[in-house]
DNA sequence: CGCTGATCGTTAGCTTGCTATCGATTTGGA
DNA sequence: TCCAAATCGATAGCAAGCTAACGATCAGCG
């Protein structure tokens, strides 16, 4: 029963490692590609907006943005209307990476699910969605009496 | 197509967060529980042996072991026969945590897959196994021409 | 018997996630 | 108008993964 959790963790780890390796060849780390994916679509978002879309915390985006800035992938600009906001803008270098990165991602997904039938893929998709829904819906976790501590 | 990867990542993250929260109530972090699971079964393994079983690198186990030692969950003992080896032994505190942790893990798995039918669970299980097999078998990733750099 | 190479664990340093806290700015009410 | 509260990014510090490099120990060959 708990075996599924183990498999899920293992599969995700393998995929993440493969993705990181593939994207590193284009000067982008696996975490950064998520930021790029959103900014390619909508440039100039704030760290907070990005964090909400990526479903990570703001500090995570801030730190990733700092590394990407150092790597020449984006620049920070203060919002002229609201001094609290910072807007993240992609550089030409980041835009140039769009096609190769998207392609690498597509190839990876294709490779990973190559041995699955279309039906199996649909099943996998819906099962994962159900798990996500279950974990986000009634967020309060199954609390076994942990009081004795 | 690449949607499955996203779902997998998201599901794993939610499960990991829930597991960490549940286990933290018993003084064990999510990464430490993996070490415990192996040592409950076979006490006195070396960091290298543990790393092989957990499919992580040796430094990862060493660092986790250091944190667990600080938390009073295990002790390091040098192997009398081979001075290079270090053997990790659980403390009574770690043994006392076995039942609650195992139970928390079981409850979490049950909760996560509560909305799935038995058939869906089997499908999920086999799909994940296929992905893992595919990613480990022909490890060399799909290399798109990244030469232009 | 001694030295060289292999085999361990450890350390250093990186990425990516988190929470908690701080500082600056903006907004809204007195 | 001005001060308090809210909002936002940045920072500090932790967990858990990784690679690379280091140091100690063992084994085997000369």
Image: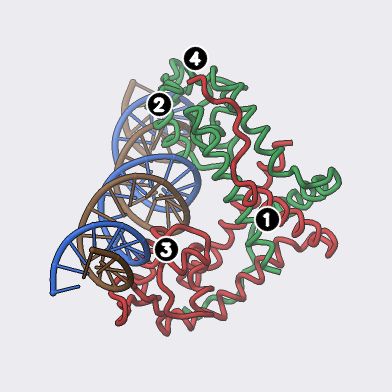
Chain colours: A green, B red, C blue, D brown
Pointer 3: what residue?
A: B61
> Residue at the location (86% across, 46% down)?
A119
Q: Mark 3 belongs to which subunit?
A: B
- Asked which secondary structure carries label 4, the reply is helix
Pointer 1: what residue?
A: A135
Mark 2 to mark 1 CA distance (whole Å): 36 Å
Mark 1 to mark 3 CA distance (whole Å): 29 Å
- Residue A41 lies, in percent from the top left, at 62, 22
Q: Residues within 10 Å of mark 2 (few under 14, many from 20)?
A: few
User: Considering only order in the chain, which callout, 1 or 2, is on the residue closer to the N terminus?
Assistant: 2
- Asked which secondary structure carries label 3, the reply is helix
**Res B82 → quadrant:** bottom left
Image mark for residue A145: none
> Residue at the location (52% across, 23% down)?
B147
Q: Mark 4 belongs to which subunit?
A: A
Q: Mark 2 belongs to which subunit?
A: A
Q: Judge depth for marks 2 and 1 and give the one in front.
A: 2
Viewer-nearest residue: D12 or A30: A30
Pointer 2: what residue?
A: A71
User: Considering only order in the chain, which callout, 4 or 1, is on the residue closer to the N terminus?
Assistant: 4
Mark 3 to mark 4 CA distance (whole Å): 41 Å
Q: Mark 1 belongs to which subunit?
A: A
- Residue B76 lies, in percent from the top left, at 33, 75
Q: Residues within 10 Å of mark 4 (few under 14, many from 20)?
A: few
Mark 4 to mark 2 CA distance (whole Å): 12 Å
């Amino acid at each position: 029963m708990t075996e599924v959790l183990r498999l899920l963790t293992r599969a995700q780890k393998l995929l993440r490692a493969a993705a990181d390796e593939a994207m590193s060849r284009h000067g982008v780390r696996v975490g950064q590609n998520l930021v790029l994916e959103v900014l390619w679509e909508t440039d100039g978002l704030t760290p907070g907006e990005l964090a909400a879309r990526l479903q990570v915390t703001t500090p995570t985006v801030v730190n990733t943005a700092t590394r990407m800035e150092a790597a020449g992938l984006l620049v920070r600009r203060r919002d002229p209307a609201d001094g609290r906001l910072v807007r993240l803008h992609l550089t030409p270098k980041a835009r140039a990476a769009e096609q190769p990165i998207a392609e690498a991602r597509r190839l990876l997904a294709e490779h990973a699910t190559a041995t699955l039938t279309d039906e199996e893929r649909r099943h996998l998709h819906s099962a994962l969605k159900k798990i996500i829904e279950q974990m986000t819906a009634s967020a309060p976790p199954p609390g076994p009496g942990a009081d004795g501590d």
